[in-house]
Image (cartoon, coloured by chain):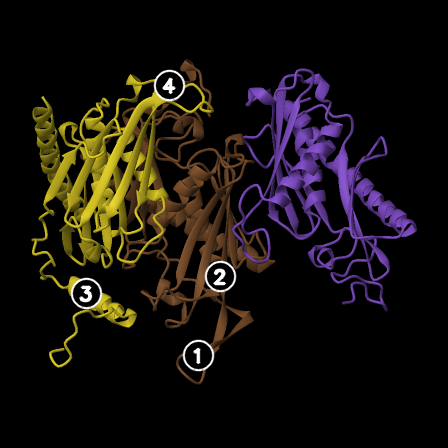
Amino acid sequence: MEYVDSLTGFRLDGRRPNDMRQIRGEIGVVAKADGSALFEMGNTKVIAAVYGPREVQNRSQQVNNQALVRCEYSMANFSTGDRARRPKGDRRSTEISLVIRQTMEACILTHLMPRSQIDIFVQVLQADGGTRSACINAATLALADAGIPMCDIVTSCSAGYLSSTPLLDLNYIEDSAGGPDVTVGILAKMDKVTLLQMDAKLPMDIFENVMQLAIEGCKAIAQYIRGVLLENTKQLECRRGV
Amino acid sequence: MATNPSTYALSQSSDSKQRLQQRRRLFQETEWTRSDGRSFHQCRPAFLRTGAANAASGSAYAEFGATKVIVSVFGPRESKKAMMYSGTGRLNCNVSYTTFSTPVRGQGSDHKEYSSMLHKALEGAIILETFPKTTVDVFALVLESGGGDLPVIVTCASLALADAGIMMYDLVASVSVSCFGRNLVIDPTSEEEACQDGTLMITCMPARNEVTQLMLTGEWTTAKINEAMELCLDACSKLAEIMRSCLKEAASGSS
Amino acid sequence: MVGLSEGEKRFIRGGIAQDLRTDGRQRLHYRPISVETGVIPQANGSARVRLGATDVIVSIKAELGKPHPLQPDKGKVAIFIDCSPTAAPMFEGRGGEELSTELSFALQRCLLGGRSGAGAGIDLSSLVIVEGKVCWDLYIDGLVVSSDGNLLDALAAAIKVALSNTGIPKVTVNLGASPNDQPDVDVSDEEFLQFDTSGVPVVVTLTKVSRHYIVDATSEEESQMSSAVSISVNRHGHICGLTKRGGAGLDPSVILDMISVAKHVGEQLMSLLDSEIAAAEASAEDQ
């Protein structure tokens, strides 16, 4: 299958190879949570909710010098094209939960909140490729909304390599082509990589290009997220009458 | 049939389908006789006994027509370690079916819906404050399912709780009514349940005139609900009498 | 789950007794309801309903299946509800399962009618394509995104709206040569049939707090309830289902009283939803 049109250079959904899908972020979608956000990347749509910092629920997990960060990733029954009743805690969601937890833990200043617990719940409403990245972006927004101290904002984006072209932000069809898929998470301001995952194989020099493309994507998302946070803060200020 | 005598005939699926449809038509008519010869407003004879299982703190056996249920109650005993402290007691209910309870051999699995219904029916009657930090387990096993299973389970469970000496405000009696066209039929058999238009089940504490749980499906007018509720409540108070006499008998027998 | 001080509890109960609740509503007033359709493009129909801070999404998917051998002239409908941990941390892992199954059963009871199909909100015989062979299986999936009480009413409303938004693909059938063959079914991806949702009931939950009962309780108010009765009412004012929650018993006359109140409130809710559905459809056509 041709994933990039050899004549026009357009992808299946009409994007150019280094185009990202339309992104949208919204803060405060779950009223009862301490922080929450919705993040869309094209048709991929996820909700993240943050509860905490609060008392540790299970005493045996308590850490005395830092906060305990927990994460649960779940997919709605209707999130994929074919309806499947998925059991909770299957391998895939456990793995993604772990990835998100480790990525977010790296940016949260956990030493400021000893003996407490922060829960991050991400719920996929629609899956169309790049759920991992979308979840991390949503979690960043939700953590910021909850006012949890972070050293920087983490953003994530994926890139792939199909039809000898590096492609930014794969959708479901491109993702299921089985080609290499590099997911990168960066700390935007510090310019540090906190998450790097790839399946399939790729020559070293091409990998660098693909990773660079993904990092560019992350930076673009970081810019957008900063804009969303700024807008939200302005509104909060406005409500307080400052 | 006379020309081809057969001692055993396998019931064919198309046959049973036709019969089901025939029956459905029959039930729509205003006058028909029930397969067990009861009148519409007559319950099946109830047989109740306490002390059916020795290992349990309390138990009861109930037989309403073809429906046979055994309930054992354990506790109050210490709650699981993982449970947080609770100032009131906990009630844990579980309803399961045996593999041979239905005409077609079943899975013999737990019935989640009935378990939660049983819990909701009983929790209002038990004085949970009398056993803090502990749990009472109610295990109901349906030996044979012959219609009106849930009401029988609830009735039998409250008898078992009384046998176990768990403090209750009153005995909980339960009766269901099926609706066929314009008719109301009390205490339906499974044959009748398969064709019903709607059903109303009430669990109540007759002495306090309180409904602890009710469930209704199908389309009903208010007047009909009224009529069905009255019918149920009347039957419940009579059933409670039978339960009480069963308990009295057990108490006088043991002393 | 809801931690309230003694004073807050008394404030809530006192407000209800004086017909002025903590958010300024009267006892029989709903919170503002907002309806959005077509939120899940992959589904045949979907809706998002927000009732104050309660937020639910319902999606409807139709798949080809085989009718039940005992009911060859009927399609199948299944309702599954999921409680997302985003709504409350207690739903994490298997924590939400108990509530999810309870909500699923309650909705099945309230919307799918009796054994013979009387009082069902969805006409199952309209889902049959070839009698005894092919039918539509309708999967109704609900997701609780945010929870602030009265989930059952919100989910039932969302199902009603989602059904009105559902398009079932038109099918053409080529019957096989012999009657035992599985017929060929050609599913059109252009023409869709709309559902008749006029018969789908609305669910009104009356929550009893001390001596009075209220509609559309928030989770704070629900923590103070002694019992709650959910009543499903259809367009003709008939009762299509009823379930009770909560420990305390109720006097039979109170139940009858609640039913008549629910009928009245249900009428208002029904017309409100109708206008919301019409508005959502109109805005969808504009786009």
Chain that the image shows in purple: A
Chain that the image shows in yellow: B
- Mark 3 belongs to chain: B
Crowd tier of the residue under label 3, counting other residues whose Cα lies within 10 Å: few below 14, some 14–19, many 20 or above: some
Residue B23 rendering spot, x and y as whole percentages: 19, 65
Residue A217 higher or lower than B91, as above or below: below
Choose mark 2 or mark 4, whichever is in front: 4
| Label ID, residue B133 | 4
Labels 1 and 2 in the same subunit = yes
Residue C269 rendering spot, x and y as whole percentages: 38, 45
Choose mark 1 or mark 2, whichever is in front: 1
In this structure image, what is the colour of chain C?
brown
Image quadrant assignment for residue B202: top left
Q: CB of mark 4 within 8 Å of CB of mark 1?
A: no
| Label ID, residue B208 | none
* Residue at the image point whose x is 90% and y is 49% from the top: A204
Q: CB of mark 1 within 8 Å of CB of mark 2?
A: no
Question: Which secondary structure lies at badge 2?
Answer: strand
- Mark 4 belongs to chain: B
